[in-house]
Structures are given as C-alpha cells and as structure tokens.
Amino acid sequence: LVANGNVNQPIVFTSNQAAGSRALGDWGGVILMGKSHLNSAGGIGNIEGLTVGPDTQFGGGANPDTMDNSGILRYVRIEFPGYVYQPNKEINGITLGAVGKSTTIDYVQVSFCNDDAFEWFGGNVNCRHLVSYRNLDDDFDTDNGFSGNVQFCIGVRDPNIADNPSVSTSEGFESDNDPTGSAATPQTSAQFCNVTWVGPLRGNVGAVVATGYRRGARIRRNSGLKIYNSIFMDGSRGIHIDGTACEANATAGTSLTVVNNALK
C-alpha cells in the first residue's frame, strides 16, 4: 500500500457515512501484512477476527525477511475504524502484521477507533510521528515479537470513551510477548521514545471517567518492551509491570526497560 500524502494534502481513510453521522466502528481499518519475523508457531499468523486463510496470513515463516517492504503510509489519517467482524474481535485502526523495516510509517493519526489505534504483531518496522486520538481500547499495542523503534508519538484519551472492562481494559500501552506469555523468540522488544500520553482525568483527579480506563502502560506476558524519555499524565494509574516474568525482565535490566519518563 502506497499512501504518500503531505502536510497540506493528507490522505484520509474514513467512514462512508455523512459527516456528523460517523461513529466508531463504521468500517474495518488499515491492515498491512508483511514477511518479517513473528514468534507465532511456524513464523506465521492470521489477522484476528477475519476468516483464517491465505488472504489473512502474515509473517515470513521459517525464512523471515526483516527488510520486507509493505509500502508507505505518510501524512495519513484513519478515522472511525474498528468494525466488529466477530464478537469481541474488532479490527484496529492500523494493524501491522510482521511488517518489515523497509516500510515507511510516518505522520499517521488514528481517531475514533472501536479498538486499538496501533497494534503491531511481530515485525521490525520503524515508525515516527504517530497520533492516537479518542480511541476505545489501547493506543499502542505490541505483540508477538515486535522489535521496531517508535518515536515522537502522542495519545489523547476521551474521558467518556473506553472499552468494556469485562472484555478488555483501556491502556496507553499494552504489551505482550505472545498471548500465553511464553518465552517464544524473538521476544517483543520494541523501543518507544518521546511519547506523550494524555489520560482521561484532564487535571482533575476526582473526575468521573469511563470505567474501562486503567493505566498509562501495562507491560505483561513476558514482554521486553522499552519506553524512554516519555510523559504519562492525567491517568488514574501509571505504569504496571504485570506478572513475574516481566518483573524478572525488568530486574535483569536486559530486556524490559522504563527509563527517564515522567508521571504527572
């Protein structure tokens, strides 16, 4: 996919409903499927919620191509995505399945999504200048061995828009090595730098917000995520290193790292 806009003429993926009648989940979302690495069995995965088959398959298998090129997304807005194809299996604003390093992801905004704004399943694509605005579930979700570098991001939450906590809680960051928290390799080890996350409280610690809100970051299931030089503000909770495997990763100081961040 080549969607190469510019600052004066961004490319907009949006609902087909009339302006003023658009809503979260009006359509699916943007999905890129590459041939880079993935820690799923056999190095192959399928996009969640869609029919399993060749058209939904991503990953380079036994011979991943870390320099794989899935195209260009530059100066792009993605609005009102997150269609529910199966119960509790919505499509993300942008789903990056094993996307390789030769892909360009720069100046991309996801707004009013009925699921996560950005979710990476494996791969090693580098991304810059990402905006997550008023989405339902997580802003930045990393899984299945994603190891790219992501820089210059902002996430802004709507106090009234969060997921159903009986299904999923809404986080700024959510990160897993894989769904079971195994030691599968490559480990999720993405590096995020210079991120500003603005939670739902808006400076009022007593504000009433949607019940699905939880943390600025939840790093769990044996992830080795790294977050540097970032700001977490207006959230009811900060950063949660969740589970013994992630605690061990943080204590070892060789994978999970959270350094030079501010909580306000």
Image (cartoon, grey):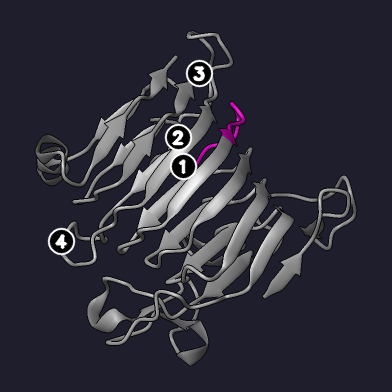
Which comes sooner in the sequence, label 1 or label 2? 1
Please state which amino acid type lies under the numbered disc 1. Asn
Quadrant occupied by the N terminus = bottom right
Picture quadrant of residue 29: bottom right
Q: Which residue is mark 1?
A: 164
Q: Which residue is mark 4?
A: 182
In the rendered image, the residue lying farthest to the bottom is 54
Q: Are marks 1 and 2 in contact (CB under 8 Å)?
A: yes
Instruction: Tell me if mark 1 has few (under 14), some (14-19) or many (20+) residues whose alpha carbon lies within 10 angstroms of its own.
Output: some
Q: Is residue 214 magenta?
A: no
Q: Nearer the viewer, residue 9 or 82?
A: 9
Where does the magenta region start and end?
A: 155-163
Question: Disc 3 vs disc 4: Cβ atoms closer than 8 Å?
Answer: no
Does 199 appear above or below 27?
above
The image quadrant of residue 123 is bottom left
First in sequence: mark 3 or mark 4?
4
Residue in view at x 42 percent, y 72 percent: 98
- Residue 138's x, y, as percent? 47, 44
Label of residue 108 in the image: none
Q: Nearer the viewer, mark 3 or mark 1?
A: 3
Q: Secondary structure at mark 1?
A: loop
Regarding mark 3 in the picture, which secondary structure is present there?
loop
Mark nearer the viewer, 3 or 2: 3
Which residue appears at 12% of the width and 46% of the height? Answer: 245
Q: CA distance from mark 3 to mark 1?
A: 20 Å
Q: Residues within 10 Å of mark 4 (few under 14, many from 20)?
A: some
